[in-house]
Image: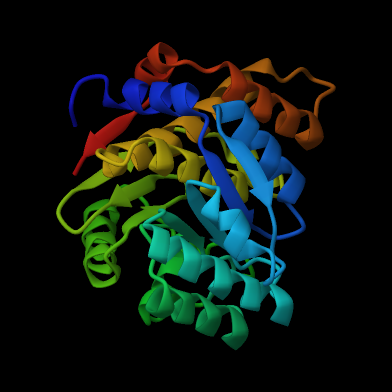
Amino acid sequence: MKPYALSQALKNVRATTPLVHCITNYVTVNDCANALLACGGSPIMSDEPKDVPDIQAICGGLVLNIGTLNELTIEGMFAAGERARDLGHPIVLDPVGAGASALRTDTAAELLNAVGAQVIRANMSEVKALAGAAAATRGVDVNPDDAVTEENLQASAEFVKQVAAKTGAIVAVTGAIDIVADAERAFAIRNGAPIMGKITGAGCMLTCVTAAYAVANPDMMLEAVVAAVAGMGAAGEMALARMQPVDGNASFRTYLIDALYNINGEALEAIARVEEL
């Protein structure tokens, strides 16, 4: 990775304020909007099928998050995805809970087939389900058997590169160790804090932030996705360092968004723990 690529990716987001159309789940929609604002982007939320083509036309990118599917949102996702595809806007797919139900798995696969994605952001169980590999999910959480560890890191990275090659997308697998890969290159990222798993929406927020980075950095999208993932992990570490004995996970959520707002390119470069595999 080029020197200062992470810093430049963040600076490009702040300089351009990319408008991102988010069709995300209603459990986390407010946090997603605030995370986008904090990182330097601008959110707009719409899943009404008659509305989304016009909304996508004024945006730079699209998030498709399948966390709370219903017939209306599915129709809206396809309509928005088709418009984004036709306009050449980056699509970030978050297959929340893929493998937990046929509807989730099939919808994610059909979206990939019909409109494609430039980035897939998921945990390893969801990626395995999307790839048709054996995976036993635990709802929206990764199965412990699928978790990326130091022992299986290289094999996991090769698998993620294969999924990237098959889908044509940059694949960001997040967990205790994150992997970001395209078909040729893979990076391990070791930022973050375990308490991030104790709030609802850390992954959904990251997906929306990733879309802003993708829109703002079309010529260095792999590095931009690495920067987004490392930046969220670094923000988690900054938020944890701010915690007081009376604070709990609700305070952490607020501190996390604060950290996304306050982190700058130089701090990101200093905190990020990124290794090319």
**From what the image shows, is residue 147 above or below residue 272?**
below
Location of residue 256 by image quarter: top right
Which residue corresponds to the image point at 40% horizontal and 43% vertical from the top-left?
214
Name the spot of residue 176 as percent of width and height, x first.
Answer: 46, 45
**From what the image shows, is residue 218 above or below residue 251?**
below
* Direction from residue 175 to residue 75 in the image, left or right: right
Location of residue 169 by image quarter: bottom left
Q: Residue furthest left?
A: 184
Q: Residue furthest right?
A: 246
Name the spot of residue 262 as percent of width and height, x first.
Answer: 58, 16
Which residue corresponds to the image point at 42% horizontal and 79% vertical from the top-left?
114
Which residue corresponds to the image point at 61% horizontal and 36% vertical from the top-left?
42
What colour scheme does the image use?
Answer: rainbow
* Direction from residue 3 to residue 160 in the image, left or right: right
In the rendered image, the quadrant that contains the N terminus is top left
Asked if residue 70 can be seen in this view, the reply is no
Question: Which of these two is toward me, 220 or 99?
Answer: 220
* Direction from residue 191 to residue 221 in the image, left or right: left
Question: Which of these two is toward me, 173 or 215?
Answer: 215
**From what the image shows, is residue 233 above or below residue 168?**
above
Name the spot of residue 185 as percent of width and height, x first.
Answer: 18, 49
* Direction from residue 269 to residue 228 in the image, left or right: right
Which residue corresponds to the image point at 63% horizontal and 78% vertical from the top-left?
75
Asked if residue 276 can be seen in this view, the reply is yes
In the rendered image, the quadrant that contains the C terminus is top left
Name the spot of residue 98 as percent of width and height, x first.
Answer: 54, 74
Question: Which of these two is toward me, 171 or 177?
Answer: 171
Q: Residue furthest bottom?
A: 102
